[in-house]
């Protein structure tokens, strides 16, 4: 999967550069997040601006990252959700779990 | 009243790389319907999602990830009714255990719930050497 990883102060920004986050590539995102946690990162922002389709396994990968961050006293926050993607979080009630921001600036700013 | 009549029959290898292809076919069918008065973009996302979830389920659970197997998909639109059938060659599973929504922090178990939320009728039954997941939506 095409993922851009940038260190922004103490926070890691992961930009998903795919139109779809589904059962074919969600395992890659999950593995990459796990690697970052193992390397000592606790706070992540996932930029989903390019993603126009997410399925249950994509949501599951993000839940996995959320739980890993929380268990390390960190946070996983989301930014840039397209309308249809956002409606998937609402349908599965995950909008009550994640902190969701309009864009990455807002999400990164929330850590300071 | 005039209605659309479309039939699509596809067989693809039992591999997740083809989810995108099948999802796009569903999306394009929604956008191509001549007689549909609802939110077309929403329907396009829903068909993409239902096909992706049903096919991923067949690949990973019913066909146990065996890349030599195949998934057979039928999409039929007739008389204002859309029916999707996804055939697998596995032992089957109890669909009822996935009908209720997953705990928000569960990593799995949302796929069948999402299908139930979107479609009007869902059934999983034996067919040939495996099973078929049949999903129907009435197009208003």
Image: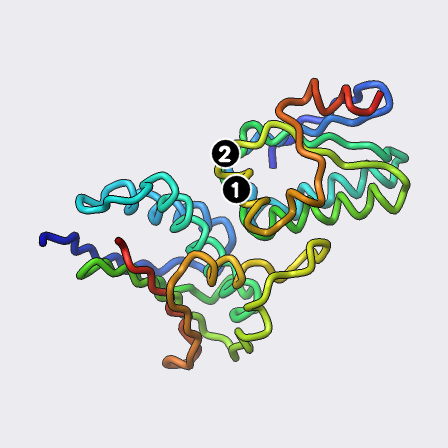
Q: Quadrant of the N terminus of chain A?
A: top right
How does the figure colour the protein chain or chains?
rainbow
Question: Horizontal and vertical percent for residue B86?
Answer: 39, 65
- Work out whether A43 lies above or below B131: above
Residue at (62%, 62%) from the top-left corner? B109
Disc 1 is placed on an element classified as: helix
Question: Horizontal and vertical percent for residue B2?
Answer: 10, 52
- Work out whether A7 lies above or below A84: above
**Chain under callout 2:** A
**Residue with the mark numbered 1:** A87
Residue at (73%, 54%) from the top-left corner? B105
Q: Do badges 2 and 1 share one subunit?
A: yes
Q: CA distance from mark 2 to mark 1?
A: 6 Å
**Chain under callout 1:** A
Quadrant for residue A39, please give it.
top right
Q: Residues within 10 Å of mark 1 (few under 14, many from 20)?
A: some
The answer to whether B132 appears left or right of A32 in the picture is left
Check whether the beta carbons of the residues at disc 2 and disc 1 lie within 8 A of each other. Answer: yes
The answer to whether A86 appears left or right of B87 in the picture is right
In the foreground, B61 or A79: A79
Disc 2 is placed on an element classified as: helix
**Residue with the mark numbered 2:** A83
Residue at (26%, 57%) from the top-left corner? B8
Quadrant for residue B104, please give it.
bottom right
In the picture, the disc for residue A36 is none
Residue at (51%, 57%) from the top-left corner? B114
């Amino acid at each position: 999967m095409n993922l851009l990883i940038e260190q922004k102060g103490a926070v890691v920004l992961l930009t998903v550069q795919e139109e779809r986050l589904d059962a074919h590539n969600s395992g890659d995102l999950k593995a990459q997040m796990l690697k970052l946690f193992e390397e000592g990162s606790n706070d992540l922002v996932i930029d989903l601006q390019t993603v126009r389709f997410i399925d249950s396994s994509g949501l599951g990968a993000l839940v996995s990252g959320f739980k890993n961050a929380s268990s390390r006293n960190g946070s996983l926050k989301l930014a840039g959700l397209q309308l249809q993607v956002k409606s998937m979080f609402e349908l599965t009630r995950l909008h009550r779990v994640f902190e969701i921001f309009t864009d990455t600036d807002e999400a990164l700013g929330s850590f300071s | 009243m005039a209605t659309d009549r479309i039939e699509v029959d596809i067989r693809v290898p039992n591999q997740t790389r083809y989810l995108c292809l099948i999802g796009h076919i569903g999306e394009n069918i929604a956008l191509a319907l001549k007689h549909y008065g609802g939110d077309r973009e929403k329907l396009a996302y829903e068909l993409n999602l239902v096909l992706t979830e049903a096919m991923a389920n067949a690949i990973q659970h019913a066909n146990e990830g065996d890349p030599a197997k195949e998934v057979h998909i039928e999409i039929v639109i007739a008389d204002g009714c859309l029916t999707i059938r996804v055939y697998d060659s596995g032992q089957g599973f109890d669909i009822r255990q996935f009908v209720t929504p997953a705990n928000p922090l569960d990593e799995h178990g949302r796929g069948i719930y999402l299908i139930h939320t979107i479609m009007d009728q869902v059934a999983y039954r034996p067919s040939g050497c495996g099973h078929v997941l049949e999903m129907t939506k009435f197009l208003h």
